[in-house]
Image (tube, helix red, strand yellow):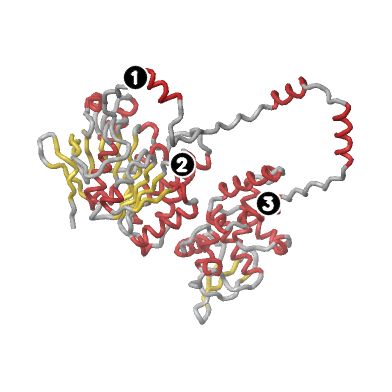
């Protein structure tokens, strides 16, 4: 069934339609400077397609929460959820086919990137049974897929950029159709923008953005000047879901309004000068006074104050001597690095986060306890993380046999190490072969289907040999170590998930 939604009208007065089924397969990029009408365009698209397809809107400014009352979208306040919780919410969104608005307005930029990455990752990692068609609208996409490093940490930028890349490059097979809007194409990562086949280009003034817009539309450079002459709400459309040739269109009206509103001139209130001064200099009846935090003094200021201070009086010296004579309890012993590592890995969500994220958490806790966590570099921490994900205890990890297995795992890709060590641990102890759910957990995923792909990769690489006994149990042999697991049920549930 072909569904054509009306986006507005062409310059000839004809309806400008968008093929919704084609959009699901080819994705959309919207570009325009601030005030060109991008949010209005996205709102029109969301309203017209709300009855036909499930939607998820990543909203950094809280402008689309007004869709909830009119169209039934559920508003998810990202500030009230952790990253792990947002992944689970996103999985349930796809499972129950509920349209949502992810409101990020109460978070700073770095936390917006982290929470958006977690939410998009949850949409992407669901089971194949829930790969229903879904529009994923990302406003201000240059925040989540920046072309260059900014003031945020590299880890936050990489996780957000990776989630956006998955959405635009690999999301189609999972039913996800990315619709991204940006103020400047030059600030948007090229590998994200290049995956869109449909374009709506609005008013643009900078030469570099006009040139990229003209290149994407297949126009000559001299024609790029036309983007400066576009009015608010006017766009140039191109793509299999819109038009086969560049087509000027004007976006139609919308049913809901954003909370930001439009800048309109209005007369100032007629207030006498004396009253105006009292209004701004005196607090109102229900106004709460804000207490400004004192800035932390620098080390130089503290040393200057100590140098300028007078020597204490004799009475004060005697009081200090009396106080110092009182026996004091010894300070608590600092935890070791292994204690901090066990505390970090004790969080169940740590196994489903990237190694870089868990390593940063480890360093922060080391600073809190006053220990030097940099003694363990990222490579050593990755090996410890792989051992922990494999469920290896400390006694087994110290044996020479396990050291050989650990050395073999170092040469493997990061996402394979934990799975290899889990199979090695089961074979070493002659335990049943881990199930698909347990292997997926070692990979940092909740999708058992990923385990089958990992096992196939390891088999093709000659790392393992898979056999099946007479009762359908799976047996894995590691030729490089000479170890073999006992038969295990591949479809058994993960005991930790059941708990």
Given residues 340 and 124, the one toward you in this image is 340
**Disc 2 and disc 1 in contact, CB within 8 angstroms:** no
Judging by the rendered image, the residue that carries numbered circle 2 is 107
The percent position of residue 160, horizontal first and vertical second, equals 45, 44
In this image, 145 relative to 8: left or right?
right
Give the total number of marks visible in the rendering: 3
Q: Give the residue at mark 3.
A: 340
- x, y percentage for residue 399? 73, 62
Q: Is residue 235 above or below residue 276?
A: below
Q: Secondary structure at mark 1?
A: loop
Mark 2 or mark 1, whichever is nearer to me: 1
Task: State how far apart marks 2 and 1 are (Cα).
Answer: 39 Å
Whether residue 368 sits left or right of residue 86 in the image: it is: right
- Kindly identify which residue carries mark 1: 272
Depicted 319 relative to depicted 369: above or below: above
User: If the image is split into quadrants, where does the N terminus sit?
Assistant: bottom left
């Amino acid at each position: 069934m072909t569904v054509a939604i009306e986006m507005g009208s062409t310059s000839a007065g004809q309806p400008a339609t968008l093929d919704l089924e084609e959009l699901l397969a080819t994705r959309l990029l919207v570009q325009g400077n601030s005030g060109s009408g991008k949010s209005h365009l996205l709102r029109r698209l969301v309203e017209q397609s709300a009855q036909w397809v499930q939607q998820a809107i990543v909203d950094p400014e809280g402008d689309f929460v007004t869709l909830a009352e009119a169209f039934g979208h559920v508003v998810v306040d990202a500030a009230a959820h952790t990253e792990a919780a947002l992944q689970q919410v996103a999985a349930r969104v796809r499972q129950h086919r509920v349209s949502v608005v992810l409101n990020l307005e109460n978070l700073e930029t770095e936390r917006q990137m982290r929470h958006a990455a977690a939410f998009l990752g949850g949409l992407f990692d669901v089971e194949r049974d829930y790969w229903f068609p879904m529009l994923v609208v990302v406003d201000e996409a240059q925040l989540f897929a920046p072309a260059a490093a900014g003031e945020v940490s590299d880890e936050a930028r990489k996780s957000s950029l990776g989630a956006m890349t998955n959405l635009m490059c690999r999301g189609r097979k999972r039913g996800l159709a990315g619709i991204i809007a940006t103020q400047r194409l030059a600030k948007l990562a090229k590998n994200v923008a290049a995956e869109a086949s449909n374009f709506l280009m609005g008013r643009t003034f900078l030469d570099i953005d006009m040139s990229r817009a003209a290149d994407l539309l297949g126009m000559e450079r001299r024609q790029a000047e036309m983007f400066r002459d576009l009015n608010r709400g006017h766009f140039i459309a191109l793509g299999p879901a819109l038009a086969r040739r560049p087509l000027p269109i004007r976006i139609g009206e919308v049913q809901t309004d954003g909370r930001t509103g439009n800048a309109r001139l209005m007369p100032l209130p007629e207030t006498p000068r004396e009253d105006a001064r009292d209004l701004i200099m005196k607090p109102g009846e229900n106004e709460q006074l804000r207490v400004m935090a004192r800035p932390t003094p620098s080390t130089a200021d503290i040393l200057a104050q100590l140098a300028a201070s007078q020597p204490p009086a004799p009475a004060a010296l005697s009081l200090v001597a009396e106080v110092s004579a009182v026996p004091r309890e010894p300070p608590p012993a600092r935890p070791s690095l292994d204690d901090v590592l066990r505390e970090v890995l004790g969080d169940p969500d740590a196994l489903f986060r990237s190694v870089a994220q868990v390593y940063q958490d480890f360093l922060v806790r080391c600073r809190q306890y006053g220990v030097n966590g940099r003694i363990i570099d990222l490579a050593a921490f990755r090996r410890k993380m792989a051992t922990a994900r494999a469920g290896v205890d400390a006694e087994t990890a110290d044996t020479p046999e396990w050291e050989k297995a650990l050395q073999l795992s170092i040469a493997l890709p990061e996402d394979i190490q934990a799975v290899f060590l889990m199979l090695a641990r089961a074979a070493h102890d002659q335990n049943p072969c881990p199930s698909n759910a347990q292997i997926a957990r070692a990979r940092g995923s909740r999708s058992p289907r990923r385990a089958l792909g990992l096992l196939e990769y390891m088999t093709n690489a000659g790392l393992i040999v898979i056999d099946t006994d007479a009762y359908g149990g799976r047996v894995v042999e590691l030729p490089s170590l000479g170890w073999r697991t006992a038969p295990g049920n591949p479809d058994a549930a993960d005991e930790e998930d059941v708990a």
